[in-house]
Image (cartoon, helix red, strand yellow):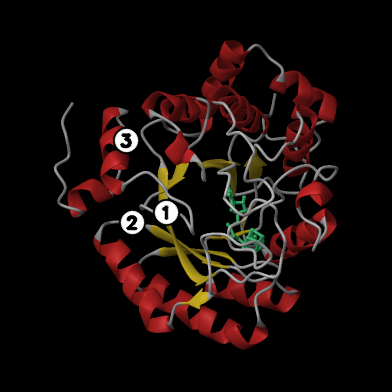
Amino acid sequence: MDMIRNDWTIEEIGTIYHTPLLELIAYAANIHRRYHSYREIELSTLISIKTGGCPEDCAYCAQSARYATHVDEPQEMSKEEIIARAKELKSKGIPRVCLSAAWRQLPPNKFDEILEVIRIIKNMGMKVCLTMGKISADQAKQLAEVGITAYNHNIDTSENFYPKIITTRTFKSRLETIYRLIEAGIPHCCGGIIGLGESEKDRISMIHTLATLPKHPFTIPINALMPIEGTPLEQNKPVSTWELVRVIATVRVVMPTTHIELAAGRIQLNDEAQALCFMAGANAIFVGDKLLTAPNPSENNDIRLLNLLGVKQPYADKMNLKVIDI
Ligand code: SAM
Ligand code: SF4
């Protein structure tokens, strides 16, 4: 039976999601190995080119201008600073950067500069992703021409729960940008967060929305909420490993070829929890001590863990770090 389907019903996804956990992990692992290798995990590093001062009110986000968080005055990196940062990452062997900006939508007056930066970084032999909010059809066309690897635009949760988390935009407007990306032929990176206060039904619904897009996302970031002081969700309790693994395994079963990014919240996971997430199908991580504004496991710690798990990673030797033989 062809495993790549876009006509999943919500009942089917619910049945998969509620499979007894060890069975579900084994099922997901079996599918994972048909389409991916446990020796490979995609590495990329986020560069926050515009941090803070975002007009949106995402209840989880430190960068929203609405909340008094540890992220204060908005900061923008110059073109030279972005290139220098990319060069530094390239020298460590990091193959891909994701340029992020806390904008509601990519401002037209910044667009040409962003295109130029993308060209320069690509000419350095690196892959470039973007996550900069809504984009117009014309911007999508030009981003396709310049050849970005993917554009990130998360739906974050179910359509039903979305208005409880974000009120300055709609779930529908998020999907409009995803459809624009698909039309322009740009691989879309679209996922979400668990631990927002959503129900299991919401998680299943979010996965159903992703699995029934005309094209499955190139990458699905699965974030575990990191409660940020000053945001409306600051008191939320962190999700358990078991919930995270269940979501990852379900995504893997219904979208076998998609890369699944074990994204924010990884610092809250020990080695065994991360290994279980990889077992269940996660095969991409952000490396570097910081995500956009939140902490991430250190590079050395990641090299140690990936080495321990037998994952080939290009950057250990280039960082002339002692690659520990286990
Ligand atoms: N500003 C762009 C946007 O919102 O599309 C991209 C910024 S960043 C890639 C946004 C994503 O990071 C969110 O969609 C969410 O999935 C994740 N994120 C942000 N704050 C988080 C938090 N406190 N805990 C976990 N994930 C978080
Ligand atoms: Fe702005 Fe993105 Fe943060 Fe939402 S998640 S507040 S859009 S930076």
Most extreme residue toward the bottom is 109
In the rendered image, residue 250, in percent from the top left (x then y), is placed at 65, 27
The x, y position of residue 116, in whole percent, is: 48, 82
The residue carrying mark 3 is 306
The picture places residue 127, in percent across and down from the top left corner, at 43, 62
Q: Is residue 74 left or right of residue 312?
A: right
Asked if marks 2 and 1 touch (Cβ < 8 Å), the reply is yes
* Circle 1 residue: 44
Q: Mark 2: which amino acid?
A: Ile
Kindly identify the amino acid type of the residue bearing the numbered disc 1: Ser
Q: Secondary structure at mark 3?
A: helix
Q: Earlier in the sequence, mark 3 or mark 2?
A: 2
What whole-number distance in Å separates the C-alpha atoms at marks 3 and 2?
14 Å
Q: Give SS at disc 2.
A: loop
Q: Are marks 1 and 3 in contact (CB under 8 Å)?
A: no
Packing grade of label 2 (10 A; few <14, some 14-19, many >=20) is many
User: Relative to 214, is 261 on the left or the right?
Assistant: left
